[in-house]
Image (spheres, grey):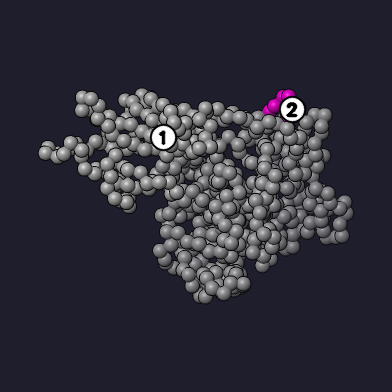
């Protein structure tokens, strides 16, 4: 445990640790999984930072890791399912095993084909769990690097490694911060190694921080056999060298725009509110509209098409208004790629179907090993026990120890259990659809009859930028003041890299560059 190459830091000295065996989640806990705990009244919903959208209840993100949860939220969920947060030592063992490699997959440098990091995906955000099979750990644990950081059980101490017990360490007895491991979708390469340690106060919420659990119970359900037939699919387009896009109907990014609020006086001396919208100069203004609220009238500047001015009954001085600035048109991608199949499936071009082929293996094995299709030679239990990383099953009446595998492994169980609505095919050891029920597309895919394949859903909802803006009040001149009032606002910089603007009244707590008159 720790980094043998480091000379300083909180992950030295590198030291030997022994652990009891344990079962754990292959993936980070997803929004869909966590939602069940919220629905049961046990877990608190995630809380996004002010002004940031919440994707927790968005069905398009149900298989993304849950984020914006505190340490206690994570601990409550794990306890609810009969588990607990992994200790820091358990997490590092699951990520590295005894390989000594710095990364879950080995020594190769991190790349966008192995993990979601360093803003690999654009827009930069989480990916669905299990999206990076090339980044699995020695135990087939997914996303032990990238995607989101993960809460673990331990209190944090910078010098804990120098005092850690050699067996089943659980961290200091007390502290002010909890240990955070792994890395996130923004993390730079230097911070990706699995030996890196981080910490957060237990009440922290971040959009790149989630968790997974270890199981404390004795019963572990085996996964069902694979599906016999699937409809082929057409991958979405990707820039050469980049990982495949997993979801294209992102729906949460709208126009890039700065919004400025002002107060004015009409000929009757009544106050009214107005807005100035400055769009990014790369914006296609023909596809932009004001989605809400009603009662807002916006017109472009005659000299600058990327600047709009807005007035209307929705803008009341002294009040806050939510503005939605949206795109209204999209150019869906052209389907030009050939249909494909998942790993271990072969394509039948005539039908467009993918048939399960399994994994090759020997037909005979030297005793006492047992030849199991899809696995090769497997050992029998010794004194009723299987080696670490294996679970006991039965093949043709003979007990065998089957490795706990990722999605690329088939499972030979007696009796086999298929998902509801499917039947077991004994000849191929897989689960198939009944003759009167056709296969269905993967989640987030729809069937395209013209291609006889599943394609990503092309229905993209309007993408909006949501802005909460406070309309200032006009500062009335005091009696006896000159006809031209003095300074009423402040020069401030609201966006890095942009020039200062005169804002009235002066926003509290914002550094200003002197008084000004709007």
The reply to whether the magenta stretch includes residue 451 is yes
Q: Which residues are magenta?
A: 447-453
Residue 392 visible here? no
Residue drawn at x 55%, y 55% as measured from the top left: 187
- Structural distance between the alpha carbons of marks 2 and 1: 44 Å
Crowd band around label 2 with a 10 angstrom C-alpha radius: few (<14), some (14–19), many (20+): some
Image quadrant where residue 263 sits: top left
Image quadrant where residue 476 sits: top left
Q: Which residue is mark 1?
A: 277
In the picture, the disc for residue 451 is: 2
- What count of labels does the image hold? 2
Q: Does residue 170 sit above or below 297 in this rendering?
A: below
What x and y, as percent, mark residue 235? 70, 37
Side (left or right) of 229 relative to 267 = right
In the picture, the quarter occupied by the N terminus is: bottom right
Residue drawn at x 80%, y 48% as measured from the top left: 359
């Amino acid at each position: 445990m720790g980094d043998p190459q480091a000379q300083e830091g909180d992950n030295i000295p590198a030291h030997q640790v022994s652990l009891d065996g344990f079962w754990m989640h292959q993936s980070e806990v997803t929004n869909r999984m966590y939602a069940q705990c919220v629905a049961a009244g046990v877990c608190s919903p995630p809380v996004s930072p002010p002004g940031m959208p919440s994707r927790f209840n968005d069905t398009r993100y149900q298989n993304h890791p849950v984020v914006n949860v505190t340490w206690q939220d994570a601990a409550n969920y794990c306890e609810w399912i009969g588990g607990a947060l992994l200790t820091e030592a358990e997490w590092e063992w699951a990520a590295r095993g005894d390989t000594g490699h710095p990364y879950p997959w080995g020594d190769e440098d991190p790349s966008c084909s192995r993990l979601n990091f360093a803003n690999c995906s654009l827009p930069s955000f989480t990916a669905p769990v299990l999206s990076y099979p090339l980044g699995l750990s020695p135990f087939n644990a997914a996303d032990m690097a990238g995607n989101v950081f993960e809460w673990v059980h331990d209190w944090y101490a910078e010098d804990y490694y120098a005092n850690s017990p050699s067996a089943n360490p659980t961290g200091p007895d007390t502290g002010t911060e909890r240990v955070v491991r792994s890395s996130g979708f923004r993390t730079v390469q230097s911070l990706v190694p699995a030996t890196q340690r981080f910490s957060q106060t237990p009440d922290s919420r971040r959009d790149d921080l989630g968790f997974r659990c270890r199981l404390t119970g004795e019963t572990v359900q085996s996964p069902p056999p694979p599906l016999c037939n699937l409809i082929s699919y057409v991958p979405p387009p990707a820039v050469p060298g980049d990982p495949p896009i997993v979801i294209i109907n992102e729906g949460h990014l709208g126009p890039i725009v700065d919004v400025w609020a002002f107060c004015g006086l009409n000929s009757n001396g009544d106050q009214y509110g107005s807005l100035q919208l400055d769009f990014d100069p790369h914006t296609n203004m023909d596809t932009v509209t004001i989605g809400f609220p009603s009662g807002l009238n916006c017109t472009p500047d005659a000299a600058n098409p990327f600047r709009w001015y807005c007035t209307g009954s929705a803008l009341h001085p002294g009040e806050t208004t939510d503005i939605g600035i949206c795109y209204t048109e999209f150019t869906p991608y052209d389907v030009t790629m050939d249909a494909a199949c998942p790993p271990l499936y072969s394509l039948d071009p005539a039908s467009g179907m993918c048939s399960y082929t399994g994994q090759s293996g020997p037909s005979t094995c030297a005793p006492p090993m047992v030849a199991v299709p899809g696995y090769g030679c497997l050992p029998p239990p010794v004194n009723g026990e299987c080696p670490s990383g294996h679970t006991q099953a039965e093949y043709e009446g003979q007990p065998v120890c089957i490795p706990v595998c990722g999605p690329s492994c088939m499972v030979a169980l007696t009796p086999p259990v298929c998902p509801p609505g499917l039947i077991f095919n004994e000849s191929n050891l897989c689960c198939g659809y009944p003759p009167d029920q056709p296969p269905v597309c993967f989640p987030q895919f729809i069937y395209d009859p013209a291609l006889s394949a599943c394609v990503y859903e092309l229905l993209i909802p309007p993408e909006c930028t949501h802005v909460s803006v406070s309309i200032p009040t006009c500062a009335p001149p005091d009696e006896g003041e000159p006809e031209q009032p003095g300074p009423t606002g402040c020069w401030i910089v609201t966006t890095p890299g942009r020039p200062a603007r005169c804002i009235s009244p002066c926003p509290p707590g914002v550094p200003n560059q002197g008084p000004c008159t709007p």
